[in-house]
Structures are given as structure tokens and as C-alpha cells.
Amino acid sequence: MSYLFSDPSFWVFIAFLIFIAVALFIKAPSMIAKLLDGEIENIKSELDNARKLKEEANSLVAEYERKVQSADEEANNIINQAKEIAKNHEETSKAKAEEFIKRAEQQAIDKISRAEKVAISKVNEEIVANSVNIAEKIIIENINEQSSKKLVEQSISQINKLKT
């Protein structure tokens, strides 16, 4: 038996038995079970909190997705309205430009017509003035006393015809 006391595995076995006896005496298994139960409860609580946070995060994600979709729709509506306004402005501008061009064209036509009338009037005045000058020259060169009496008589007869 002396060889038993000199064997290290024997002493390890004895120490193990003493350890188990002490552990059973101070009720270590129930303490370990309580610690493990507490940890299990903490883990369950953390898992519940994590589930709640995940649900909140999912609801926030869904809410933000709805907000993004709503913002996209609103942006599209604003873009469509802006396009419509731009189209209306373009049409209005085209109509105003066409009206301006028509007015300018009519003003140019009126101006040309007035200038034409003035030119015709000046030409007529010049023709009349030249005709009078030529008539004077012809009369001065061709009329004598006899022809002048004849012209006066003809003029009087024409006046008398006009009176009747």
C-alpha cells in the first residue's frame, strides 16, 4: 500500500474526491444551477429585447420606405407639374412671339403703304408741276390773241353746259 501513497495519480484521485465532497457540502451544484438559470434568464431577456428592437427596426424601415416612396411620388408630381408649366409657358411665349411678328409685319406693311402713298403723291405733284410748266411754255409759245379768244369762248360754253 505504500506504493499507493507514492503514486501521483492516487493523490489526484484523492484530491478529486475531496473536491467533490466539498462541492457537495457547500451545495455547489445548486449554486451553479442558479448561476446558469440567471444567465439563461439574462440571455432570454436580451433575446426578447433584441426581438423587440428588430421589430421596431423593421417597422422603422417600412415607415421610411413608405416615406421614400411618398417622396418619390411627390417628386414625380412636382416634375410633371413643372413640365406642364414649362409647356404652358412655351405655348404662351410662342403665341406672343407670333402675335408680335404679325403686328411687326402689319406695321411694316402699313409703313410701306404710307411711304408708297407719299411717293405717289410726290410723283403726282411733280407731274402736275411739270405739266403746268410745260403747259405754260406751250401756251406762251402757241397762243396769240385770236387763239386766246377762241379758248375763252370754248371755256365759257363748257361752263354753260355744266350749269345746265
Image: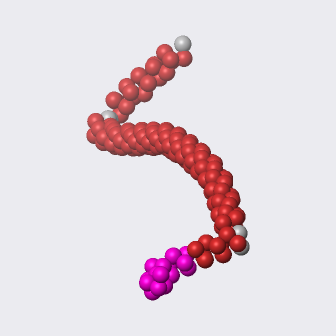
Image point (60%, 47%), residue name: 62
The image's colouring method is: secondary structure
Q: If the image is split into quadrants, where does the C terminus sit?
A: top right
Instruction: Give the total number of marks visible in the rendering.
Output: 0
In this orientation, which residue lies closer to the viewer: 127 or 30?
Answer: 30
32 left or right, relative to 156: right
Image point (42%, 27%), residue name: 152
Residue 118 vertical placement versus 37 (above, below): above
Query: Which residues, given as a range, are shown in magenta?
Result: 1-16
Verify whether residue 12 appears in magenta: yes
Where residue 34 appears, as percent x and y from the top left, is 70, 64
In this orientation, which residue lies closer to the viewer: 80 or 103?
Answer: 80
Where residue 126 appears, as percent x and y from the top left, is 36, 43
The majority secondary structure of the magenta stretch comes to: helix
Where residue 55 appears, as percent x and y from the top left, is 63, 50
Image point (57%, 48%), residue name: 65
Where residue 160 appears, as percent x and y from the top left, is 51, 18
147 left or right, relative to 24: left
Verify whether residue 137 appears in magenta: no
In this orientation, which residue lies closer to the viewer: 152 or 164?
Answer: 164
Image point (35%, 34%), residue name: 145
Q: Quadrant of residue 77?
A: top right
Q: Quadrant of residue 124?
A: top left
Q: Residue furthest top?
A: 164
79 left or right, relative to 24: left
Q: Is residue 5 visible?
A: yes
Q: Is residue 99 visible?
A: no
In this orientation, which residue lies closer to the viewer: 126 or 84?
Answer: 84
